[in-house]
Image (cartoon, helix red, strand yellow):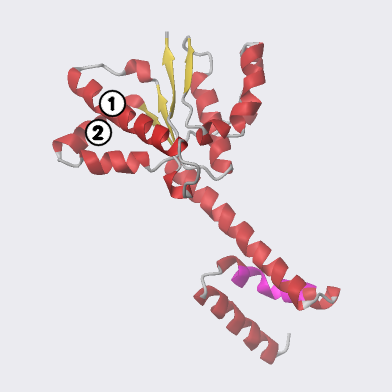
Amino acid sequence: MPMSDSGSLSALQLQCKALRLPTAAQVIGETLTLAERENWSPATLLGHLFGQELAGRQQRRIERLMKQSHLPEGKTLATFDDSRLPLRLRRLLPQLRTGDFVNRADNILIFGLPGTGKTHVAAGLGHELVQNGRSVLFTPTFKLVGQLLRAKRDYELERELRRLDSFEVVILDDIGYVQQTREEMEVLFTFLGIVIHNASLHSRQKQRPAHCLRAGWCYHETN
């Protein structure tokens, strides 16, 4: 590439970065080469470049959502042996994977004996939702209760509840293992009450901005 072309490319890359188009900055060189070889029109070139940027942004968003979700690695539906489930539940899984229950603000409860894969199924659904751009938080119930108790002690309970309510889906793992003292039940039901109230409120709205989407919680309990 001639020095002048190299300088022009560097300038374009800097301009893309200034416009906060990091993916476009990375691929613009190869895109221009491809456009010249294929004799693309300006509209085709820009469409390809912006498409790459949009795909990059979506991937980075999913990575951020996955990081903040605290979902256990490896516990996906792809690695779950669904033959362990009753036929009725196996038929229900594809429907749950779509995430339509989030739009309806439905709650999912998973019950069963220890070792039957409840955590794996709940986490697997969480992974699917994140890949579809949903904000998810996976947390053991005892850990959530501890966080709420500390927030209450430090007079930060309202702020912590708002943070938790910002997730579209909260998966409470092993809710049956909470010690169930009065203080624990108080903060847990305060959290659940806010989730249910907001889910009901927003599910009744005909139009709502994306940041107001709420779902209930997905948890499992051991009999």
Q: Position of residue 128 (x, y in %)?
A: 58, 36
Q: Residue at x 62, y 69 (%)?
A: 24
Q: Quadrant of residue 14?
A: bottom right
Q: Tell me where residue 98 appears, x and y as whole percent.
A: 61, 34
Whether residue 146 can be seen here: yes
* Location of residue 124 with respect to 6 vertically, above or below: above
- Which residue is labeled 1 in the image? 188
* 144 within the magenta span: no
**Residue 9 got which mark?**
none
Along the line of sight, the residue nearer the viewer: 140 or 133: 133
Q: Magenta segment range?
A: 24-34
Magenta stretch contains residue 28: yes
Give the vertical position of 121 relative to 130 (above or below).
above
Q: Which residue is mark 2?
A: 148
Chief secondary structure of the magenta portion = helix
| Tag 1: amino acid | Leu
- Image quarter of the C terminus: top left
Q: Is residue 25 shown left or right of residue 66?
A: right
Name the one closer to the observer, 195 or 69: 195
Residue projecting furthest to the bottom: 4
Quadrant for residue 23, please give it.
bottom right
* Residue 143 in view here: no
Q: The residue tagged with tag 1: helix, strand or loop?
A: helix
Instruction: Identify which residue is drawn at 21% across, 38% down.
Output: 157
Whether tag 1 and tag 2 are in contact, CB under 8 A, the answer is: yes
